[in-house]
Every structure is written in C-alpha cells, then in structure tokens.
Image (cartoon, rainbow, N blue to C red):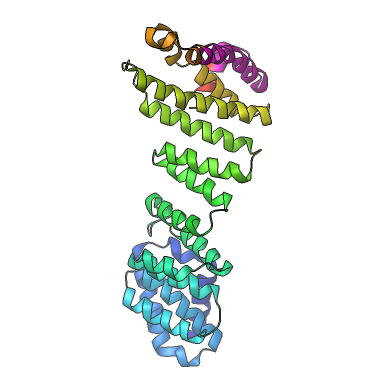
Amino acid sequence: MSRLSKQRYLAILSSGVFASFSPEKLNKLHQEVGDYLNGYSGQLDLTERFNLYELQFYLALLTNHDVEAKSYLDRINDQFAGKPSQKIMVLRLMYYEACGDMKAAVNALGDSADELRASRRLATFSRTKQDGSPNVAEYIKNLNYYLNLQPSDSLAWAELGDQYNKVGHYDKAAFCFSEVLLQEPNAYNIFYKVGLNLYYQFLQDYQDKNDKKDKVLASLALLENARDNFLRSVEISDTYVKSWVGVYVVSGHSILDKLDSNKALAGQKKVTQFVSETRQLHQLSKKRIIELEKLQSEDELSKFLEGDF
C-alpha cells in the first residue's frame, strides 16, 4: 500500500494536477501526504523524500498551513545549502507570496538570470486563485515587480497590457503595449492594441454634452492618437482587418460633427485638418473591410462590426 501511495503522490506532483483540486480534496491530500511522510519517510530514497517534501510544501501553502510550509521549505533548503538552485528560489517566492510579504520576495530575487526566471514563474503562478478563478490584481502586481527587474521582456509587457485592459485601465494598457513597440517596431497587432486601448480611454473620458474647449481638445488628442496607431498598423499589414475596423469606428465618431459645430474649435487649423483627414478615411476603411471580409451588403457589414469594439 505504501508503494502505491508513494507512486500516486509522485504522479500528482509531476503533473501539477493538485493546483486544480477543490479545497476539500486539497485538505484530504495534505493530511494523507503528511501521514505518509510521518510513517514512511525513512524508507524513501533521498530524491523521493525531497520530492514529497516539495509536494507537501505546496499543499501546506494551498491549505493555509504557512508554518508547516516553512518547515518543509527549510528542509529542502538545507539539502541545497550553498548550491545555486532556481527551484529553491521559486519555492521561496511562493512562500513569501502566500504570506503576503512581497518586499521579502523582491529582496530575494536579486538580479541574476535564474532569479529573474524565478520571478517570472512567480508572476505566472499568481495568475489564478486557489479556486481557479482569475486573480487579475495579484497578477498585475507581480508582473510589475518582475518588469522592474527585467524591463526588456516584451512578452511580459504585452501580458501586463492585456491584464490592465481587463480591469479598464486603458491608459496603462496603452503604455504597456507601447513598451512592446520599442522592441518590436513592426508589430502591427500591437499597434492595433495601442489604438484600441486609446480609443477605449477616449470613450471613458469623452462626454458628448461637454462643450468646454480644453476637455474636447483632450478627447480629440486621444482619438487622434488611436487613429494614428490603427493607421500605422495597416501601413505595416494592409490586410489586418481589426485595424481597418478601428479606423472605420474612429472616423465615424460623432465628435467629428461636434468639432464642426463648435465655433471656438472649428476655426483652428489643426482641428479642421483632423476632421477632414479622418472623414476621408471612413469610406476607405469601409471599402477595405468589405473587400477583406468579402461582405455582400450593408447588413453583413453591420453584423460583422457588432463583433468588434
């Protein structure tokens, strides 16, 4: 029985399936593995014993037995004392994260390549809660910690941008995607994401009934920036339909009529130029969408656009 139990526990560790267990199942497994180690630890070879220590460390964290988790972490750490180990770094970071001690986690990271990889793994680990639901706030926090250490990781910037988009921080999302473009200047899909988030930010800020000049101009700047990012995207890839949709939506917004009717703004060259150029793009973008998607009617176009923006 002890041999079968050992094999089962080692299989659970290697597969990582325990991370999706229900709280009841986690508590039961935590008790089982603890009892097994108390009864059979001396019969295990060194590798098996420390693998089960690692499993029990995870289970202790997931069942809120932080003191017990620390005891297993110390045992594993003693085994690797004086030897660089990315695994130990990851386990430490997980422990600090579970205890809410992010300052200790950052201090432990340092700046070596292994430690940076460990930090990235910690960020990934924090993506979901124990029940499997998204943990966006914690994930954002850990991605920010990681990017403070490794600001050249364009994939992490893109991931952070996606997370900010989910929680409605469109200005921060646009900034993150702009950081990606510093390293990937021809990434047309990222130009689209910058434009999309700037457009969403514009929608957050813009109030149709607000005629104050400064407020309208601030909204106009966001819309113009969104438009220019969509245009840069299709300049790089003329067949990227999402960005053509972006151009179409921007060029058909009601703010253009408002700019025409606002006497204080209609006389400004910059404003009139923006309105004129943007309106010209409306038919062009519509034509490209119809061509690329092979749409046959206005109804088909309307239905297609319902899936965007």
How many numbered circles does the render carry? 0
Residue plotted at (38% across, 74% down): 30
The residue sitting at 67% across, 18% down in the picture is: 291
Q: Is residue 160 left or right of residue 24?
A: right
Residue 134 in view, yes or no: no
Q: Is residue 268 above or below residue 113?
A: above
Q: Position of residue 301 (x, y in %)?
A: 56, 17
Q: Residue 181 placed where, x, y %?
A: 59, 41
**Which residue occupies the foreground of this view, 264 or 202?**
264
Q: What secondary structure is the stretch in magenta mostly built from? A: helix
Please say if 155 is above or below 94. Answer: above
Q: Nearer the viewer, residue 260 or 130?
A: 260
Q: Is residue 275 above or below residue 80?
A: above
- Direction from residue 22 to residue 290 in the image, left or right: right
**Is residue 232 part of the magenta span, yes or no?**
no
Q: Nearer the viewer, residue 82 or 166?
A: 82
Q: Where, by quadrant of the figure, is residue 188 drawn?
A: top right
Does residue 122 show up? yes
Residue 145 at x, y = what percent? 44, 58
Magenta region includes residue 276: yes
Q: Position of residue 155 (x, y in %)?
A: 57, 50
Q: Quadrant of residue 33?
A: bottom left
Please identify the quarter of the rendering in which residue 27 is found.
Answer: bottom left
In this rendering, is residue 239 above or below 285? below
Q: Which residues are magenta?
A: 273-301
The structure residue drawn at horizontal position 48% and vertical position 38%, both measured from the top left corner, is: 174
